[in-house]
Amino acid sequence: MTLQPSILFVCLGNICRSPLAEAAFRIEAIAAGLTVSVDSAGTGAWHVGEPPDARARATARRHGVSIEGYRARQIGVDDFFRFDEIVAMDRQNLVDLAGLAPRGATARLSLLLDHVPGREGHGIADPYYGGPEGFERTWDEVTVGARGLVARLLEG
Ligand code: 4NP
């Protein structure tokens, strides 16, 4: 295993799923004693500079973590070299990332749920247009994914 693996979580807007994935992964990595470098980004630019969606912030708060200080950013070419792993929330994100990846990119691309045995290839649905309960489900899914990814990183 890389001494301090670096992981970038990516969704479309970087205001709902990937900030929650980043927060859940920080919790799981700390619990496992794994030192990591973590960030999140969006494939789209609509929300650049904004804090996460209020519903995502409330969900994180309910689970004991603050994402108030997070600010949305768009993925850039450098990210494909800076991070060991770029982890997409859904299949469209993964397709978009594959299209953006520059020649010689070193980051490994995957879906978050690829790291959960039995859920490989599955995406995490976008909760943006739904009700608040969708965010609770997102939290459950990113937590399961984060646990699987931590376990995989520990395996090496
Ligand atoms: P996210 O959700 O990709 O989980 O951050 C979305 C947030 C905003 C938009 C789409 C998805 N939007 O179109 O503005």
Image (cartoon, rainbow, N blue to C red):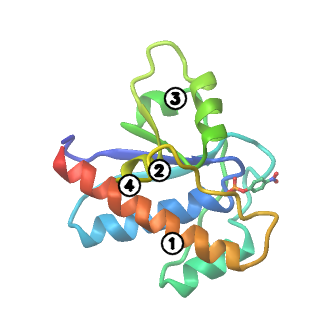
User: Which circle's residue, 1 or 2, is located before the other in the chain?
Assistant: 2
Q: CA distance from mark 2 to mark 4?
A: 8 Å
Amino acid at the residue labelled 1:
Asp
Q: Residue at x 61, y 77 (%)?
A: 136
State the image quarter where residue 145 is shown. bottom left
Q: Secondary structure at mark 1?
A: helix
Q: Is residue 58 above or below residue 150?
A: below
**Mark drawn on residue 78:** 3
Tell me if 12 is positioned left or right of 105 in this view.
right
Which part of the image, by quadrant, shows the N terminus?
A: top left
Which part of the image, by quadrant, shows the C terminus?
A: top left
Q: Is residue 130 above or below residue 63?
A: above
Q: Are marks 2 and 4 in contact (CB under 8 Å)?
A: yes
Q: Secondary structure at mark 2?
A: helix
Q: Are marks 1 and 4 in contact (CB under 8 Å)?
A: no
Q: Secondary structure at mark 3?
A: loop
| Whether the residue under disc 3 has CB within 8 Å of ligand 1 | no
Q: Are marks 1 and 2 in contact (CB under 8 Å)?
A: no
